[in-house]
Amino acid sequence: MTPTREDQHWMYHNMVTSRRFEEAIAKIYFDGKSPVFNMANGPIPGEMHLSDGQEPVAVGVCAHLNPEDIVTATHRPHHQAIAKGVDLDKMAAEIFGKKTGLSGGRGGHMHIFDADVNFACSGIIAQGMGPAVGAALSRKMQGKPGVAVAFLGEGAVNQGAWHEAMNLAAVWNLPFVCVIEDNSWGISVPKEASTAIANNADRAAAYGIKGMRIEGNDPYAIYEAAGEAIARARAGEGPTLLEVETYRLAGHFMGDAEGYRPEGEKDDLFAKDPIPKMRARMLAEGAATEAELDAIEAESAARVEAAITFARNSEDPAPEDALTAVFA
Amino acid sequence: MNKPNERKLTIARAMAEAMQQEMQIDPSVFVMGEDIGALGGVYGNTRGLLDEFGPERIRDTPISETAFIGAAVGAAQDGMRPVVELMFVDFFGVCFDAIYNLMAKNTYFSGGNFKVPMVLMTSTGGGYSDAGQHSQCVYGTFAHLPGMKVVAPSNAYDAKGLMTAAIRDDSPVVYMYHKSLQGMGWLGTEAGATVHVPEETYTVEIGKAKVVRPGKDVTIVSLGMGVHNALKAAAKLEQQGVEAEVIDLVSLVPLDRDTIRASVAKTGRLIVVDEDYMSYGVSGEIIATVTEHDISVLKAAPKRIAFPDVPIPFARVLEQHCLPNPDKIVAAWDEMKAA
């Protein structure tokens, strides 16, 4: 299944929006944090995990999703949130800790919740598995349409929560897809040092479900595999495990000196940056014109700038808002 | 002997009846957990539900507490009202991330845009030589962490009304029932827990304590099994001419501080009985509730009877040495009186 011309434009658009967004965040993040790096300072305090390079996974999967479908994501959530259609203004404002943020500043960048598009993320590894499987159960019990997708990093498959939830999804034959973003690094520990097998899709055999690994951080191949998996889920044929090779172009978090990376790895990864690759392919295959892609890029840049401006210009929450919304 | 029109139920049956009635009127309510289907729950609290509602809504799970409690969070956020069972509260060690990082925090982290209307029911308590991985109460651990309502019924009337209220609540409720009150013969049964339960649906307000015995000389505050120990102690004290007022907390979160303060303002003396561990827990919180508000009402230093800060031992003599009982409460009064 090849993405239509329209899908390709959508995918490229969301990849570029995500990249521009991360670039904007990265630039602002260090305001007030130099010469001495103190995470508590600046307009965006706290930890920051950027998704540069991992955009193909988000768009290749989310191209098949509707607002009613459920996504849970991780501590590195911006690309998936954007591809799922999370409100960019409110997301930016949440990352800045503003009153107009999705959660009024209570959650921040690792706790992006948008009920309108059924998106949630959380900060602990493999934590989104249970809630995604439960949402899939809910849809099945209610007879309502919708599949649930849990995005995780390759480090998450060594968590007990991951195995338990995979088994639950399989034993109950739920409309669920687990997408492993294999960027090959769990902070500083390489995959081969943490994980007993090379291909986590092989683990699907343990649950009697289909598993696929997609190489090359290729949005087209991801689109195709995710399309099959999501169609299977929609047809009531149960869960699928996808492992996708991707690249983390940034550090684990902002401020990460990345001394653990082998010499030259970053240069190699930047040479394989999926965004210029997709642009070149679309042009070569006649899926888009230069002018169309330039327009998409301009629109993404403008959209991100507007969101950042909205966030910057928004008010801080009232301090005492901290004491509200504990209970429904 | 039953009075006319009296229908005495065990807590187990009262809990099951509340779930049954809510499932009859609300298709979003379902129950899942280990052995809650054909077995009817290890403690009998889902007995009969599988026959009426079938395996989709009375859903046996794998032994995967992290997965199914996490799944309950996801289902609750998606419009369902799951009741999930953690067979022994002691097992929270394998699944606490799903409980206190997801269930308890998602409402807050979403700014109230995600609701998590679920009930986590779990058995507590010892006294039957099951040792320290199957006998704890850990009330204070759950009550300490924000984002969960916490209730603990001492009798079947409250058990039904609290379960109905918990299922209807839009926030997560941890429903902590005590094995010795459950009405399962093989666990021993506190007779006072089996009381009249109306057939019709009703709720018991979460966050409201009850004065279960009025008195003017000393306030004894407790919950769950401790209420029965307090009532037995009060009966002994009555023989000495002492009128003890007994408060059943019913809920730990929200905590009904007003009822506690009003009682101690009247009696001037406070004894707290808690089967959970002594330090950093419920008993300290109850005392602080009084002392930080108005220490002048106290005629004597407060006393607490709680489980000492040791893991719960197996041997009968060891465990019974540690558990609260009526005699310890009477002894606390004697010390208080002498002071």
Image (cartoon, coloured by chain):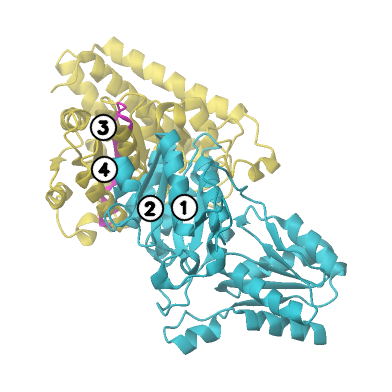
Chain colours: A yellow, B cyan
Instruction: Verify CB contact (< 8 Å) between mark 1 and mark 2.
Output: yes
Residue appearing at x 35%, y 55% in the figure:
B66
In the image, is residue B213 above or below residue A307?
A: below
Q: Label 2 belongs to which residue?
A: B46
Q: Which corner quadrant of the image does residue A71 belong to? A: top left
Q: Label 1 belongs to which residue?
A: B15
Please check the rendered image and state whether residue B49 is part of the magenta-colored stretch, yes or no. Answer: no
Q: CA distance from mark 2 to mark 4?
A: 41 Å
Please check the rendered image and state whether residue A150 is part of the magenta-colored stretch, yes or no. Answer: yes
The subunit letter for the residue under badge 1 reads B
Q: CA distance from mark 1 to mark 2?
A: 8 Å
* Sequence-first tag of 3 and 4: 3
The subunit letter for the residue under badge 2 reads B
Residue appearing at x 40%, y 35% in the figure:
B28
Tell me the amino acid under the disc marked 1: Met
Element type at marker 4? Answer: strand
Tell me the amino acid under the disc marked 4: Glu
Q: Residue B49, how many percent across, how many down?
A: 35, 47
Element type at marker 1? Answer: helix
